[in-house]
Image (cartoon, grey):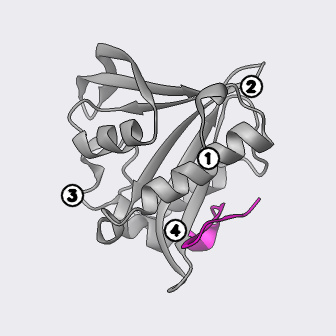
Amino acid sequence: MILETERLIIRPIKLEDKDSIFEYRSDKDIYKYLGWIPETVDDVAAFINKVPKQINEPETWYQLVLIEKQTETLIGDLGIHFFGKENQQAEIGCTLNKHFQQKGYASEAIKKVIDYLFQSLNKHRVITSIDPDNKKSIRLVERMGFRKEAHFIESFYMKGKWVDDLIYAMLKKEWKK
């Protein structure tokens, strides 16, 4: 599966992507809100090797990378978590290299992936989980039409402490291209 937007190619992650991913995923400015922070390039390789070979497998995370068309540079990644036996819901999470943030790439990629989830995979609902302190991500998903459904208090154990978790969601019938 390869998706394209005006400025991006969105494709499945490959082992050859490990150095680029490690470069931004291990950046202390970026990983503040991330659950997975690789300590070495080998950690990234191990992560890539665990990604299922096929999209839409229940109870898996499928990982895509975002490639800027003009420079052919890997600028970020986007994970899709497929839920349960009915497999009608998905969770998404996007991480961008700090040098490519605030340029519309995240919204461009997320819109394309959401469209794919609703139109091609016929998902009923898409959610995203956000740290309440991650104001940029909150603004992004609200601009895209996600609604806040829950604020869970100290519900997620990360980096040695309990943190809050916001859940934003959108139904297929609410999605506008």
Locate residue 171 relative to residue 135 in the image: left or right.
right
Q: Which residue is mark 4?
A: 18
Locate residue 49 relative to residue 101 in the image: left or right.
right
Q: What mark, if any, has residue 177 been given in the picture?
A: 1
Q: Which residue is mark 2?
A: 87
Please say whether residue 34 is visible from this viewpoint. Answer: yes
Query: Sequence-wise, which precedes: disc 3 or disc 1?
Result: 3
Real-space Cα separation, disc 2 to disc 3, in angstroms: 34 Å
Going by the numbered disc 2, the residue's amino acid type is: Asn
Q: Marks 4 and 2: CB-CB under 8 Å?
A: no
In the image, which residues are magenta?
A: 1-17
Query: Sequence-wise, which precedes: disc 4 or disc 3?
Result: 4
Residue 105 in the image: state x and y as whole percent.
44, 63
- SS at mark 2? loop
Q: Which residue is mark 3?
A: 29
- SS at mark 1? loop
